[in-house]
Image: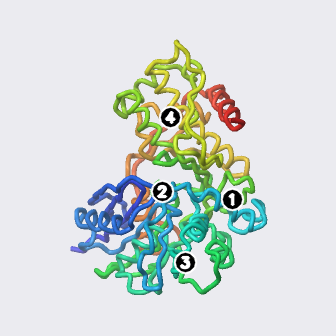
Amino acid sequence: MVRRKLVVGVDSSTQSVKVVVRDAQTGELIRQAREVHPDGTEIDPEIWLRALNKALLEAAALEHVDAISVAGQQHGMIALDSTGKVIRDALLWNDIRSAQSASDLNSELGGKVATSRKTGSVLVASFTAAKVRWMSDHEPENASRVASIALPHDWLSWQLQGASDFTTLFTDRSDASGTGYFDPTTSHYLDEVFSLALRRDGKFALPRIAGPHEFAGVTKHGIPMAAGAGDNAAAALGVQAKVGDVVVSLGTSGTAFAVSNTPTQDPSGEVAGFADATGRFLPLVCTLNAARILDAAMRILGASHDEVGELALTSKPGANGLSLLPYFEGERTPNRPDARGVFSGMNSSNSNRPDIARAMIEGMLCGLVDAVDSLVNLGVDVNRIILIGGGARNPAVPSIASSLFGREIVVPPQGEYVADGAARQAAWALLGGAEPPQWNVGVGVRVNSSATPEVVEQFRVLRDDTAKW
């Protein structure tokens, strides 16, 4: 009897690490495991590695498998010295101390228009380049030791290989395009931008860019490793998104990204011109506040995740005039890192649990309505919206999202989309072919609710008014 081919997909995210083992040809889920990561905006990456090894062991993911791929949260800065030692705790995408550094780099590169033309994006606090500059200015001794900068998925893939030397350190173009010192159109590093960020010239061992469906390394256990990907690019693979699809993800952060055949450049900075994991492009808009708003609603209302949704569905669209600006942790899009959340329009009639629940869900989603509009304004085709992430599982979110977007929403079957995408990439490298294998992962639920543009307008008035404060 011929043993079927199995592939492993890893998602090392902000909150946890997920591991899936799937059939390479059909996508059937065989085993899975999950381990939690601690909260925070900086972390010793060894904690990620310990969690990953534990999850791999629990899922028996290193036994009788044929390929593996690691996806991870974008932007995180892991500074390495000439021996490969981690210099300081990794700064994560949600660490906003580098906001001024991003602004400085944009200016030094000639302004937002010039920066977007060069890197595909206007730099903001989350980009790796901004964190490198912050380290150079605030921790010059650490910056002076830098021989390489790795991203979370790069570093974990390197550790699984044994991390012998920098020749085995690799990444892919999707994750590299979030550094701010990479050109997603040519798929090459911008050495002059990296040196500018670090404030010194030199020859640095930045991770090799592996092709979308090549094996880039081998684990210590002899398992071939695919290139891996940034989390959003992997999620696009996981839901099998096509050109014309916009994926709206409600994780810790909120993202709206589209698969596109052509690169984008947005000098306003709203849309990041990332690469995807297939050789195409992934224009993306990110908000800092998504599922964390649902978590806050649970605390405020003393209710479970599902109960918050059920409360919201008993309220009217617009929450009887109550609006929430959901900038609890500052905001990336629009770029307002020092902003905070604001309730507006509260009165004796709408200061109740259903209206508060509705306003919090609508506020979370309205920022992503703006995100999709930004993609459309750049000429990105939007044929359908795929809603994913933990927030999408709330019973009220799909119907409220459909009414706010004014479009049909597709909610795929529940899964670990980023880890699934990594597994699908590993299967692509294993099986070959011009495109990733098509897996039968089930048909998504379609939701179509009456449009409520007045709710979006109510949100935008609050958004613009608070910008003047």
Q: Residues within 10 Å of mark 1 (few under 14, many from 20)?
A: some
Measure the alpha-carbon separation of dots 1 and 4: 40 Å
Measure the alpha-carbon separation of dots 3 and 1: 27 Å
**SS at badge 4:** strand
The first of marks 3 and 4 along the sequence is: 3
Question: What numbered label is drawn on residue 447?
Answer: 4
Q: Which residue has dot 2 on it?
A: 235
Q: Is residue 8 above or below residue 320?
A: below
Displayed quadrant of residue 238 = bottom left
Give, as a three-letter code, the residue at label 1. Ser
Give, as a three-letter code, the residue at label 2. Ala
Q: Is residue 348 above or below residue 337?
A: above
Displayed quadrant of residue 113 = bottom right
Q: Which residue has dot 3 on it?
A: 209
The first of marks 3 and 2 along the sequence is: 3
Image depth: mark 3 or mark 4 in front: 3
Residue at image x 40%, y 49%? 442
The first of marks 3 and 1 along the sequence is: 1
**SS at badge 2:** helix
The quarter of the rendered structure image containing the C terminus is top right
Q: Is residue 145 above or below residue 45?
A: below
